[in-house]
Image (tube, coloured by chain):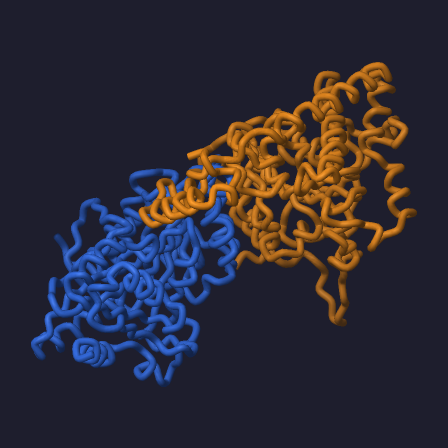
Chain colours: A orange, B blue
Amino acid sequence: MNTELYNDGPVVHQPTFIDGTSVEIPELKILHQDGTTYPNADLPEIDQALATKIYKTLAFHRVLDERMVASQRQGRLSFYMTALGEEAASVGGAAALQPQDMVMMQYREQGALMFRGFSLENFMNQLFSNGKDLGKGRQMPIHYGSKELNCMTVSSTLATQIPQATGYAYGQKLQGLDAVTICYFGEGAASEGDFHAGLNMAAVQEAPVIFFCRNNGYAISTPADEQYKGNGIASRGVGYGIKTLRVDGNDILAVLKATQIARAYAVKESKPVLIEAMSYRLGAHSTSDDPSGYRTKEEEAKWQSHDPILRMKNWMLNQSWWDEAQETELFEKLREDVLAAVKVGEKVDKPHIDTMIEDVYDVPSPQLKAQLDEVKAHVNKYPESYPFTAGKF
Amino acid sequence: MAQQNLLHAINSALDIAMAENDRTVCFGEDVGVFGGVFRATSGLQEKYGKARCFNSPLVEQGIIGFANGLAAQGSVAIAEIQFADYIFPAFDQIVNEAAKFRYRTGNEFNVGNLTIRSPYGGGIAGGLYHSQSPEAYFAHTPGLKVVIPRNPYQAKGLLLASIRDDNPVVFFEPKRLYRASVGEVPEEDYQLPLGKAEVVQAGSDITLLGWGAQMEIIEKAAQMASNDGISCEVVDLRTILPWDIETVSNSVMKTGRLLISQEAPLTAGFASEIAATIQNECFLHLESPIARVCGLDTPYPLALEKEYVSDHLKIYEAIKKTINF
């Protein structure tokens, strides 16, 4: 047994409890809400081009979320999830990575996809589960993914991506690639067994994975203080022997800095890092719930004053990298583009009936072919009951 | 051709798979330097290094979660679950993740490179938690392949086919036969087809169908019946999912009778699925009800194991009952 792994504390002769307060966890902050930086703050590597790209991504994120919630309210879309108020976490994390790095999302990280160039058309095709959706219209809205962009397709199953990210990163390491895997999840998902399995295995197998926890205070209606009693999620990283950072999740520069440092460490040492980004889910969990039933307006108002996008805008204005005219033009253009894309996306045909049995296996089994033939014969018999597919095969 | 037991055949298949592709990785509890509790991965860490054959922490959901990620990345992941009885913490990663990976991503990603090996079955005085045959749980999951070999020759050929198949495969190994079953196994590389049953013995009066360790028990019962002048056709299903309806149907249309025997409990076992399908496919050819000889609908007992199992005598009695219906 390697005794280095368990004890560097003093020997005592009276029992002494320890608890989470024994570990002090610093929180990285770089930007004030007014866009000024803290004195002596260690800035991330960022120039005007990257800053502009990040800011435009945040703006796109905000507009898409607003428009799609409105579309859902109009009955054009079955379901949507915003990341209102915590956009900086996914965008800032993605901006610190290289294109060859794998992104494993939970479901509130559309910002990472946007930063990598997932097109508005791709968003619409997925949201309307039409025949052009890369996922072939099989999963509920917001379950995006793209092989080309190294963004693993979202699944509804919570936290399953965490041990998978460990395995993915281990494969990257085995191949000797200059690549890491980033794995996003919320503080609620961190209660799942897969969280513990994934972090422990990453530490033991030394996988270059960045675990990125968005601690947004709520898992649907359950507040964080009914989710765990330890010192956030960061304290668990320490327990697993993983280098850990806590960061203000509404501070885009702090998130960027933390993830840049994490990536450099993960690549160089080939070991995992845990980042806990402290934020707040300003929106509802999804279009299917209403937060007024479980939290106060005062609480929400407090966090509205920490808007991460406004904070970055203020910094951009201070840098003279952005002005109000550009701001107005950008948001008007984005709103027009999204509205136009909705009108196109919702009219694209549903997937062909044959796709129903594709991708269960690499090739459909004889049983699946027989079952599809039965369905087709049935659709032909009652075409008026199956308008998406009748007459289209 | 050398005489090998089933464990050696498994080890030989793993050795070939690791030699042919340096992205093939074997892992699981105690799989590393110790070579697994049954020694199926013996010598692999020594030969291919600790990075490619290693102990995992004691966490089945983590083993399969890790394996899913590794396979999605393009590596060849061969994960061992130490006993099939302990596969259930990984059920979500198998049923919701591995099985649906290709489908839910629209084939943007897949875990076709995943093979899960696990010893299953009773007859080793293992009691409730070292004896189960959980194949039916996985057979209910589109997207998985489920494969069970009956002897060393089958084990090597089917395991190599499972590893190279572009779908996630759950490969259950009959642990009672690990050392007990010895047969001729080619040293070289070969594969046996997935999704294909095998007619082990031709016959004309009744079809006896099974898989894995149950095959030698079925063959023993067939021998007893033959002494009574009953000609049994013995069929090994080999792949539980997707299963070979055609071979089984053809056999039943010839014999007019079907008996299915499995180690697992009777209710909702895979024998039930076969019975329903064959009743549909062969209705007008059947001369008697389809018989199922299975474990009782109880947990797997210890002291009363002999009474519990579907042994050759129970099968022999069921053959006579079916013939004399």
Q: Looking at the rendering, which quadrant does residue A182 occupy? A: top right
The percent position of residue A23, horizontal first and vertical second, equals 76, 53
Seen from the viewer's position, the closer of residues A8 and B160 is B160
Instruction: Name the side, left or right, on which A77 lies relative to B159.
Output: right
Seen from the viewer's position, the closer of residues B212 and A386 is A386
Residue B312 visible in this rendered orientation of the protein: no
Q: Please, is residue A325 above or below residue A343 in the view?
A: above
Residue ID at (30%, 55%): B243
Residue B290 visible in this rendered orientation of the protein: yes
Residue ID at (53%, 35%): A350
Residue ID at (62%, 40%): A141
Quarter that holds the C terminus of chain B: bottom left
Q: Looking at the rendering, which quadrant does residue A270 occupy? A: top right
Q: Please, is residue B305 above or below residue B246 in the view?
A: below
The percent position of residue A195, horizontal first and vertical second, equals 61, 52
Residue ID at (35%, 85%): B304
